[in-house]
Image: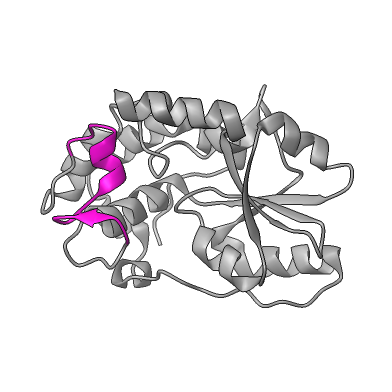
Amino acid sequence: MFFRHKKRFKGLLKGDMRVTCWDQYRLLYVRVPKSGNSSIRRSIEHGEKRRMSKAQIIKAQKDWTTFSFVRNPWARVLSAFSHKASTDTNSPRMVDGVYQGFLDHGIAVRAGMSFAEFCELICAIPDEKTDKHLCSQSAFLILNDVPIVPFIGKIENMAEDWSRLMQQLDIDIPIQHINQTQQNHQHYSDFYQDSALINMVGDRYAEDIRHFGYDFERH
């Protein structure tokens, strides 16, 4: 409870949205966890981390190029499980195989739990009570049913969408690919053999599916 109040107070003071800004390009990136965040921030040098409100981000569109990237919600949940609930991960802030942020929010994730158990647990927790890695992407990027940035790329089309963004800026900076795990070499659908599990994650992240045009697909 104290952690959530502290987080809310910090958001009121500085703005609740984490962004990275590159002043030299007048480029603003809205950071969405588990959606290519590390790759994007490390691809362009000298980015400055800041906090802004959604209203400030919308206002910045007049003078800056503002963008973000999203990911298929079923794949994003798998990535959160692989990086934040495993003794095999090198992810920072891990405590006995569990991400500290989950513990701070009172989310009863434990090392060694099955993927199905993980999904059942996190899908029962709404955005306002969960960790940022488990929040819907719509919670970051949508205000009054409208995106807060005009350019939203997709991780599934990372190379093409990143190239399109670079062309818009008239610069040529390649995207780096970071935090790939063994699971990334398998299609996310391999881990969803139960239709009930597919529907559970789909229901939890229905807003992402609606806003960003995703669906569950078999490879």
Q: Residue 38 vs residue 69: left or right?
A: left
Q: Residue at x 47, y 31 (%)?
A: 206
Q: Residue at x 41, y 69 (%)?
A: 179
Comparing 18 with 171, the one in front is: 18
Comparing 216 with 125, the one in front is: 125
Comparing 158 with 131, the one in front is: 131
Which of the 4 quarters of the picture holds residue 127?
A: top left
Residue 122 magenta: no
Image coordinates for residue 109, horizontal then vertical, percent: 18, 42
Q: Residue 156 vs residue 52: left or right?
A: left
Pick out the residue farthest to the left: 112
Q: Is residue 141 above or below residue 83?
A: above
Which of the 4 quarters of the picture holds residue 195?
A: top left
Q: What span is colored magenta in the figure? A: 92-108
Image coordinates for residue 46, horizontal then vertical, percent: 67, 68
Note whether residue 171 is visible: yes
Q: Residue 30 vs residue 34: left or right?
A: right
Image coordinates for residue 166, horizontal then vertical, percent: 77, 68
Q: Residue at x 19, y 67 (%)?
A: 88
Location of the C terminus (image quadrant): bottom left
Q: Is residue 120 above or below residue 113?
A: above
Q: Residue 93 vs residue 110: left or right?
A: right
Q: Residue at x 76, y 63 (%)?
A: 165
Image coordinates for residue 63, horizontal then vertical, percent: 89, 47
Q: Tag count in the figure?
A: 0
- The colour scheme used to paint the residues is one colour
Location of the N terminus (image quadrant): top left
Residue 106 magenta: yes
Note whether residue 36 is visible: no
